[in-house]
Image (spheres, grey):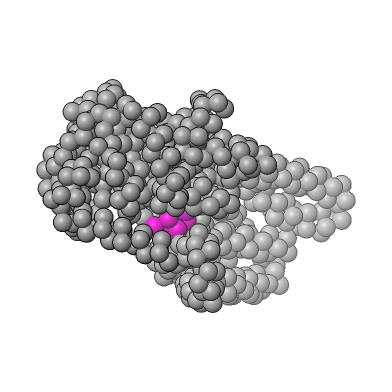
Amino acid sequence: MKKYIKYIKPYLIYFILGPIFMLTEVFGEIWIPRLMSFIINNGVANRDVAYIFKIGGVMLCACLVMVIGGMGGAYFAAKASVSFSADLRSDLFKKIQGFSFADLDEFSTGSLVTRLTNDLQQIQNMIAMSLRMALRAPGMLVGGFIMALGLNSELAMILLIVIPLLGISIFLIMSTAYPLFGKMQTALDNLNNGIKETLTNIRVVKSFVREDHELQKFTGLNDELKDKTLKAMNIVIMTMPIMTVFMNITSCAVVWFGGNRIIAGDMPVGDLTAFITYVTQILMSLMMVAMVILTSSRSMASFARVSELLKFEPELNDENAASRDKLVESGSIEFKNVAFAYKKTNVLKNISFKVEPGETIGILGPTGCGKTSMVQLIPRLYDVTEGEVLVDGTDVRDYSLKNLREGVGMVLQYNTLFAGTVYENLRWGNEDADDEEVRRFAAYAQADGFVSEFKEGYEHMIEQGGSNVSGGQKQRLCIARALLKRPKILILDDSTSAVDTATERRINEAFNSELKGTTKLIIAQRVSSVKDADRIIVMEDGSIVDIGTHEELISRCEEYKAIYYSQVDKEKEEVSA
């Protein structure tokens, strides 16, 4: 629990005041039954109306104190629990932002969402309930037992038998339910993953008319969550019947033995009334303890999941960076005998090449040959398994992650836009860019034309994920966003696959004229996309087959020639058709 102390300290006063206020409520609850016994034994028995009003006034004051205590306790408990969970959620989200791609692969998206929402809500509920019950429940239990003992020590022996038996029953129920709560949260992870996947790909689902399949899959996940929840709840709901049985048995025993004492003249009626109230309070306090344990049992499963995320150390960090203040200045790149394995599967092996500042490098090869994995090593989205990747002559692991990635602009293979205006999306590249600069770089990416046709222009609202723009428009907006960074190294990962060849040619011309000092790496499937590059890297099965200009590769590289002529022949067939 040491890791959570930092989230308690700023709100320590609330954590203290909450239980204290609840304790004032306990004092009232303990004294009111005794005061009622005074009214019955003395006021009613002696027909002393003045005495009844006097004690009644004291009871009324006690009730007012209880109201203030209850309201204050609930307020401070809510303040403490909500503030605790909000700070913890912020730190968890911040930590996730520092995860590498490999780290993110360790946790599913649905699991991360559940941990930051449902799991934290369970923890928040547990803290709020604990602060309200931490002193109230044991206070009622101990105070009620002391008062009952003072009224009649022999009748109080009944409680010494009932309380341990009830405590053991509650413990057995909760210890059985605890592991089921963990399974319930895992099922919730699976459901969230399924919902996210379906909603993200809803257009694909509809285009393949697979709504029934997705509904069936969702039903399975939903039923799994229902079944696991019911298994946990079926055990938990046994708590109330057991509590009721013990309460009724205890009340019957007290009434039986207490009634006999009243008949024998050994106990006033008011004392028996107060004793029964104390018995009820004691058993209710045990019910409160049971509810705290129940909430804690479920929240402990959530605590374990949150703690796993909190103590998870990102695989990739810059704590040992030797050149933290260094910036990317020229944009030279060098791979030295690089190998990379993903989840024990070799992806790249023996990769060595050098790129001079301002060069344009095309990267070509079949799907799955490691092109994307190779360029992702440059901004340290992943780390090499062997060898070195140098930027400006410095190992990328010696840069601070911020400085390294500030110098690298990257348009990923799968483009993503965020909910907001076109301006807001493009300014991800440079939040200080003025309107003119945004438009200029949008023009370089061939995006200004279609954006200007929107009714609101650059104030046009992009829906989440860019669902209201076409694939080609999305690609051009993502390119413009990367260009606004004015990076020294620009990586385009098959980022013009959805645009026509004429538009692609104009984008490349803008690169050559406006980004002369920027090193450009262009991954492509079409030879025409990289034909005019300074050099082209041909890859196959995680290795470099050859490096050279288009003319050099046509003359000597069989793999390149096979790709080139297959595409030329295909273009001829399309033209003739």
Magenta includes 150? Answer: no
Q: What's the residue at 60%, 72% (across, down)?
A: 244
Q: What's the residue at 41%, 34% (across, down)?
A: 510
Residue 553 lies left or right of residue 155; in this view the side is left
Q: Which is nearer the eye, 537 or 135?
A: 537
Count of number-bearing discs = 0
Please tell me whether the stretch drawn in magenta is mainly helix, strand or loop. Answer: helix
- Is residue 404 shown to the viewer in this render? no
**Residue 70, image x and y in percent?**
66, 46
Q: Is residue 471 above or below residue 224?
A: above
- Is residue 552 shown to the viewer in this render? yes
Q: Quadrant of the N terminus?
A: top left
Q: What's the residue at 33%, 52% (across, down)?
A: 526
**Residue 563, image x and y in percent?**
25, 57
Q: What's the residue at 55%, 69% (across, down)?
A: 206
Q: Which is nearer the eye, 67 or 130?
A: 130
**Residue 94, image x and y in percent?**
42, 39
Magenta includes 109? Answer: yes
Q: Where are the magenta residues, as a range?
A: 108-115
Q: Quadrant of the C terminus?
A: bottom left
